Image: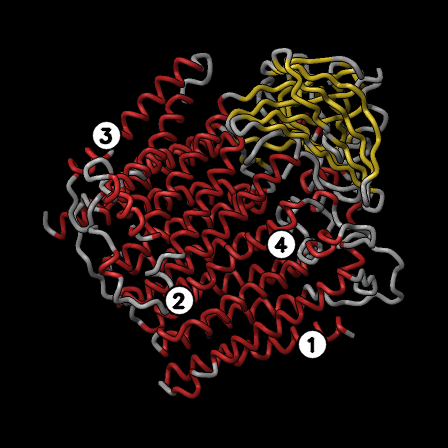
Amino acid sequence: MTRKQRRAAFIVVALGILGLAVGLVLYAMSDSIVYFYSPSDVVERGVEPGERIRLGGLVEQDSLQDLGDATVRFNVTDFVETFTVTYRGVLPDLFREGQGVITEGAFDESGGFTADNVLAKHDEYYMPPEVADALKKSGNWQGEGADAPHSETYGQGSYP
Amino acid sequence: MIVELGHFALVLALGVSLVQMAVPAIGAHRREAPLMRIAEPAALLQFALIALAFAALTYAFVVSDFSVKLVYDNSHSAKPMIYKVSGVWGNHEGSMVLWVLILALFGALVALFGNNLPDTLRARVLAVQASIAVAFLLFILFTSNPFLRLDPAPFEGSGLNPILQDRALAFHPPWLYAGYVGFSMTFSFAVAALIEGRVDASWARWVRPWTLAAWLSLTIGIAMGSWWAYYTLGWGGFWFWDPVENASLMPWIAGTALLHSAIVAEKRGALKSWTILLAILAFSLSLLGTFLVRSGVLTSVHAFAVDPARGSFILGILIVFVGGSLALYAWRAPMLKTGGIFAPLSRESALLMNNMLLSAAVASVFVGTLYPLLLDGLTGMKITVGPPFFNYTFVPIFVPLLCIVPLGPLLGWKRADMKAAAERLLAAAGLALVACLTTFAVAYDGPWLAPFGMALAVWLVAGAASEIAWRIKLFSTPLAESLGRARRLPRSAWGTALAHGGLGIAVAGIVGVTAWRAELITSLAPGESAEIAGYTLTLEQVGLRDGPNYEATVGVVRVVRDGRELGTLLPEKRRFPAERQEKTEAAIRTNGFADLYVVLGERAGDGKWVLRAYHNNLAPWIWIGGAIMALGGAMSLMDRRLRVGAPTGARSRLAPAE
């Protein structure tokens, strides 16, 4: 093999790997991305039953019910639209009524949302940014983030 | 007073760094030795001053001086001492001081031990290193001053985020930073070499140990973070593909690639300009990681800064250093002489293949991490790129890489004999096949990919062992001679084998947890039981316990298997009154092969408690494997060849035929 051929061989291999990576990324992009919806977005844009999404908003006051067998039900609202979420499992440490939450799961045929993952990535003064944006859009933003006492206004539930 | 002294020391350090950045660089350009010689004392002085500032800040935390805003925000007098100290870097400002401290430490090490470097190279390396220090010291002093006072001083602090009050997490940042910042050293060497326009063997010999040290620290830091996430987040998962985790994974992968290409640059003089590019990329990705976690664009435990000025400042640093170094690379790299021709089948090629696959892996993680941010910024569309994305992209790229790992060290330089290498791996391949079939027979109802995963793990471990066996001529010479050869084998050979074997053990752990985990979610009244993976868990009672700065609800869970009492597990839910937060403490029982993992949840309305349990097969191996990989790195670092100042004469006698 001459030097030129060797170089050509390496370039072909490199391009092959690059092509493989691009192909995999494009395939994964079309198949495995989860969109965030506020309750209003769901009504506006519509979500197919069974499509995996993130539904985020505030946990409605006094909506948390214990159904037994480690299952809970609560309402997620942006003060315009409201959806009922059913979740089986341990709620994150920072889950509270009246505060921001992100749930991941899918709607069933009857319009109920079943979550297999509930994230409360905030402390009592801070909203997940997705939820804060959704509230700003629906005109119900109270500016909770403004008077945070800690210089680090983060926090988290069961999420790194 | 001490606090003001710390602040003053930091300002002085900035002044020293400015001198260290400018004077030696001018000296190197004009070849004036007196100017170049300023670099070493400046680097040492800079380190001393930043160490003084760091000590002053630590002092304020240790004595709980709440007149310092940072201490007030992040500490509490009732906190255990270890968390008072770790509170120094458990916040944005303090962690940036730690960042520059480690940066200055690396600079000081080059100043102390760099006598055998060419004068101009040393001066330029220290100047580039100082320019990074200047940028970050400006960042600290202008946007993140840790020494701000409060007047009047509050009586009590507001506490440290409870989730940061954890032993593994207390030391996760220093290790991670040592890794991130360690790549600054290779970056400085790369930029200095580009300015010099020359890369020689001594350059590569110097870059290797710094890369190794950075890689090893980053490995430990990531493993600690992942271990912490495993036992504290209550999911029993070890990796979530969260952007913050990816931010540390990207420099690690790039660093791994750099580690391997630097071998080729050192031993064969080939791939020099590629090695320089990787050195730039590894540090750029470290800076990107710092930007992602420090700018507040991501929400996570790490996103301290909500102040947009900080985000823009770090973004500015990122653009200047990444853009500047890449521009310099584009301009100067074509002038570097390349050398070392090699055949398509050679160790160089195997290492090049490793580099290409690792680069593709970095690219896939990069896209998955930054695409959602970009999309949000451009269209306002909010998406999540979670584990499925990375399972489709990262895993298919990484698997072929794992397949060729055992092959690399067995191939000869320049032109290799494939048949001979394959023969040496015959035993490993056989073992992998046996592992595949055994797994298939034992766990036939598990995922169909799992047996191949276990085969891959065995292939890696057995492949690493085969390499050592071949090098010491095990079984082909008398045992005594083999042992003698083993003793004389360079430590870097042992390091390679350990790192590759550790990787195999970690792969086994990852496959085990992913494929065969049992999960149980239930609600139990005291006295009731539930079953998971053959264990019977009985919730005996739920009580209260007082900790130093929290009170805990403790579940007493009795574990029985096959009628045999195995003891009790005590999962806790801790409430921290000062911080007004709760934190879950999982209880884990391990036998080295599997973890039984129990989390206590909320109290349900009917007096029952929610209990979540996992049985994670092979979970401990993930971190055992990580620790072995780090050990391999440490072993290589102790190699005689890399030890600075060690006599080189003995080298050729000790090194085996390669």
Q: Amino acid at mark 2?
A: Phe
- The image position of residue B212, as x and y in percent, is 42, 55
Residues at marks 2 and 4, common chain? yes
Q: Is residue A145 left or right of residue B12?
A: right
User: What residue does disc 2 label?
Assistant: B189
- Report the disc number at residue B295: 4
Q: CA distance from mark 2 to mark 4?
A: 28 Å
User: What residue does disc 1 label?
Assistant: B8
- The image position of residue B637, as x and y in percent, is 40, 56
Residues at marks 3 and 4, common chain? yes
Q: Where B309 falls versus A49 (above or below)?
A: below
The label nearer to you, 1 versus 3, is: 3
Residue toward you, B515 or B656 = B656
The label nearer to you, 3 versus 2, is: 3
Q: CA distance from mark 3 to mark 4?
A: 51 Å
Residue closest to the far front: B480
| Disc 1 element | helix
Residue toward you, B644 or B25 = B644
The label nearer to you, 1 versus 4, is: 1
The label nearer to you, 3 versus 4, is: 3
- Report the disc number at residue B479: none
Q: Residue at x 65, y 31 (%)?
A: A37
User: What residue does disc 3 label?
Assistant: B426
Q: Amino acid at mark 1?
A: Phe
Q: Give the chain of mark 4.
A: B
Residue A67 can be seen in this image = no
Quadrant for the N terminus of chain B in the image: bottom right
Mark positioned earlier in the residue sequence (2 or 4): 2
Q: Give the chain of mark 1.
A: B
Q: CA distance from mark 1 to mark 3?
A: 64 Å
| Disc 4 element | loop
